[in-house]
Amino acid sequence: MRLRRNVIMLLILTICLPAGCTVGEIISAGGDDVKAASSVPVEANWTLHVDQTIPIEKDGMTVNYILVIAADKRGGTDIYGTYNGNAHIKVELDTSKLSNEVIKMLGGFRTEASSEELKFEVIPHDPEAYAGYYSYEKPEDIMLTPVRDYTGMALVSPKMTGTGILNIRGSGIQGEKLEVNESASGTEVFPMRILVSNAEVLVELPTLEIGKMFEGQLLGEPIN
């Protein structure tokens, strides 16, 4: 019976902690037969992590959009506060998948950008501030945010340094040749709009205009 009760309390801790529960709330949620030992808030280290690839198909081509974010906040009893970490964005296309009986394609393009000093503030969700953080040039590009309860958000525009490589080779059945080999590097600002719904994280990169949000998690590990 004691083992079962401990398992239940552990599950409740996992569910409650990202929203900022107190010890008393966690224990009392396990059932009427469990007494709250304390109402002191739980101190935790918080980690926001995103690592997802979103493939977008258009005109027979598949472009992969990849976002990786790793940021943490040391201490605190809820998700709110300053997070520090890094971010990495990659966009790539493999043109070999466009090959057919008439033309053979090789290579593609790849752009990558990174920030090793990503810093942002997670605050309570404010729909107006979130919507006003980025203005789309065309109304049809407006991102439709999933409808749910949001416990927090972050608005950040990090400067990200990266490179772009365009390397395409093609040959036709009648001897046609195509070859493009170019590269560039620089620093760009990438606006990010981050939403937090309990332990789930949704990240929008408006400048990519892909119409989808990257998904991740925001979890807290109790400090002993």
Image (cartoon, grey):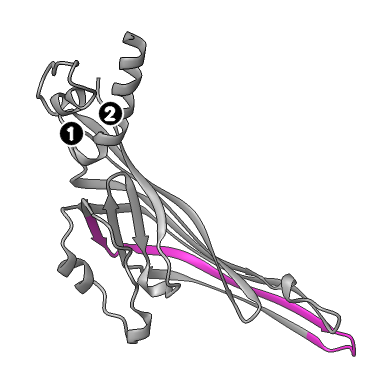
Considering the image in quadrants, where does the C terminus appear? top left
Q: Are marks 2 and 1 in contact (CB under 8 Å)?
A: yes
In this orientation, does residue 70 appear?
no
Of mark 2 and mark 1, the one earlier in the sequence is 2
In this orientation, does residue 211 appear?
yes
Image: 202 above or below 142: above
Residue 108 appears at what percent x and percent y?
Answer: 66, 72
The residues colored magenta run 153-177
The secondary structure type at the circle numbered 1 is loop
* Dominant secondary-structure state across the stretch colored magenta: strand
For label 1, the residue is: 21
Considering the image in quadrants, where does the N terminus appear? top left
* Residue sitting farthest toward the top: 2
What is the distance, in whole Å, between disc 2 and disc 1 at their CAs? 8 Å
In the rendered structure, the answer to whether residue 82 lies left or right of residue 221 reads: left
Residue 47 appears at what percent x and percent y?
Answer: 32, 40
**Three-letter amino acid code at disc 1?**
Cys
The secondary structure type at the circle numbered 2 is helix
**Three-letter amino acid code at disc 2?**
Leu
Residue 19 appears at what percent x and percent y?
Answer: 22, 41
In the rendered structure, the answer to whether residue 213 lies left or right of residue 169 reads: left
* Residue sitting farthest toward the front: 32
Q: Which mark is residue 13?
A: 2
